[in-house]
Amino acid sequence: MLRVMGKFRYKIAQEIGLIVFLILVLVASYMGESISAYSYLFIGGALLGTAPVIWGALRNIIHGEWASMDMLASVALAFSLWSQEWVSSVFIALMLSAARLLSILTESRTESSIGSLLKLRPSIAKVEREGRIETVPTAQLSIGDVVVVDAGDRVPVDGVVIKGEAAIDESSLTGESLPVDKEKDSPVFSSTLVSSGSIYIRAEKIGKDTTLEKIIELVKSSQKSRPKIYTLGERFGKIYLVSILVAAGTLLFITHNTALVLAVVLVVCADDVAIAIPLAFLGAIGSSAKRGVIVKGGAYLEALARAEIFVFDKTGTLTKGALTVSGIYPALGYSEEEVLQYSAIASRTSKHPLSRAIVSYAQKKGLKELFPETSHSVGGKGVIATYQNSALLIGRMAFLEFEGVSISDAVRDEANRLGDEGKSISLTAHNGAVLGIIALEDEIKHEAKDALLALRKLGAARIVMLTGDNEHVARVVSEELGITEFYAGLLPEDKVTRIQELLKDGEVVMVGDGVNDAAALSTATVGIAMGAIGYDAAIESAHIVLMTDNLARLSETVELSRRVQHIAVEDFWIWGATNIFGLALVFLGVIGPAGAAAYNFLSDFFPLGNSLRTWVKGRSPAPKVI
């Protein structure tokens, strides 16, 4: 890292030295009686400032990029040197050196942000080995090691708590400032800070495989991806360069006035736009990372700004993704406690989400923890168990009927009513008699409705929900959230098909939890993974990663994308306006080549200053969709 920063310091010092020298040359020109007295100084300054530009143009040609801003600047410099406009050539060199300096400072700031992430990585760790606590370098940790982390220390691995309790500040990954309570079986992640308490962690991911390291790699790669609007700028540049050369040749042929032609070329040199636009997107990417939103490239921010179709997976995205018991409905002659107790016994050893939710609810209610003698899960249908030599069944209505359980009309009607309300239903039977119904539901996130409303205000024309749940559940959730378009009963491959169909109508943003939605996320124009902390599949498949599962971050990111897109378009307008004004000054005879070079140098700071707005902390209202 020090070697990288040293490289930047050398480049910065080099450009500052050149800028100071060129400024002194210009100052000297106004202190002397004639330019000729300083001709060698001017020639030296012009040639010294020209060398990096010519080299940049040649390097671009070697890489097949003949239509670059360096090429246009080289043409302007060639005109200046050929016509012996030394002041103009020095001004051009000064202008380009200042632009290069800004570019280097931007790049160094990006590397600095990566360096700040690297500082969060602990270099040592405390490990429990053979009953003793040893301090070792983190490079020597192995998967399965028991790591001890006390208050004030950072977690050196991704793992799971096996002993102790702690409040952990996860803001380095998620951007959330409030500490998260961790206890036995809770996941913990590298770089997070233990605010209070002490925990023992079993290491599951170390080194390059940890969440922090994956984020660092994402930040690095995101800087290399240029936004599409910049690519369009380069395409425009090719046409622009040819047009300027043709126009300059035509003007020279008509007027035979090299000074006029040089002044025109100097005014319209578009180096400011070439730097301002990527500068704006880099600022937005850096701003997002500080809030726990990792954008893999400016292209995805630009696509997000244009998109009008937003597709959401239901479970884990719009809902909490964790089933909870919403009600117990005993059959005639039984109590709620009996229904829950027998249901918990039958569900005790099952790994199905419904079973886990029932057992968890029984624990919260303080029921005695009882275990079945035998238990057998029947693939997605229910559980057959025995307890004290009696038979227990829990599962779907059709499953109980298949096992020969008689279901009364009253129970059947109640189950159908609950199903129509979007509830998941489990019936429990003891020795062939139905004890009652347990209704469960996946709770909608409290911020979901406001987040969708914010998206509509930001220009989302269509909001679509995809889910593997049944029609009844999907309809209840969609109606509560105001979603009019949804598709239920979908397998992961069906979601991909739906995304492909929606892509025919425009650019599609897919929002999911990233675990079982990986294929759909990668198919969409922009795939956004929610709550991706700890999930490699989400980080790898999505284009934008929200480390927290708070939907409010989604609308904030869309708002930021609209803002940076608006700023990039403003840069073009500013550049165009300053060009028109500069050309008017040239053709009215107000400024010549030297004045044109000075004008270009000063006007460069308008679009650059505009782009720096994305680097400023805080948010401003997003503009209308462009």
Image: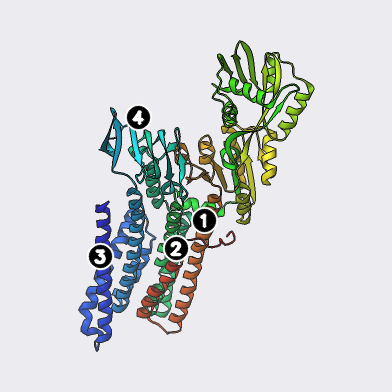
Q: Mark 2 points at which residue?
A: 616
Give the SS element for disc 2. Answer: loop
Amino acid found under the numbered disc labelled 4: Gly
Q: Farthest bottom residue?
A: 33
- Quarter of the image with the C terminus in it: bottom right
Above/below status of 112 relative to 84:
above
Residue 318 in the figure: left or right of residue 18 = right
Question: Which one is closest to the eye, mark 2 or mark 4?
Answer: 4
Gap in angstroms between the C-alphas marked 2 and 4: 43 Å
**Nearer to me, 389 or 606:** 389
Q: Residue 13 carries which label?
A: 3
Gap in angstroms between the C-alphas marked 3 and 4: 48 Å
Q: In which image quadrant can residue 256 be found?
A: bottom left
What's the residue at 40%, 72% (across, down)?
265
Q: Farthest top residue?
A: 389
Q: In which image quadrant can residue 93 be found?
A: bottom left
Above/below status of 6 relative to 137:
below
Q: Name the residue under label 4.
A: 144
Q: Which of marks 2 and 1 is nearer the N terminus?
A: 1
**Nearer to me, 287 or 369:** 369
Residues marked 1 and 3 touching at CB (< 8 Å): no
Gap in angstroms between the C-alphas marked 2 and 1: 15 Å
What's the residue at 42%, 73% (across, down)?
603
Question: Which one is closest to the eye, mark 1 or mark 4?
Answer: 4
Expressed as whole percent of the image width and height from the top left, the position of residue 346 reads: 60, 20
Above/below status of 178 relative to 60:
above
Expressed as whole percent of the image width and height from the top left, the position of residue 198 reads: 38, 39
Give the SS element for disc 1. Answer: helix
Q: Name the residue under label 1.
A: 561
Q: Which of marks 1 and 4 is nearer the N terminus?
A: 4
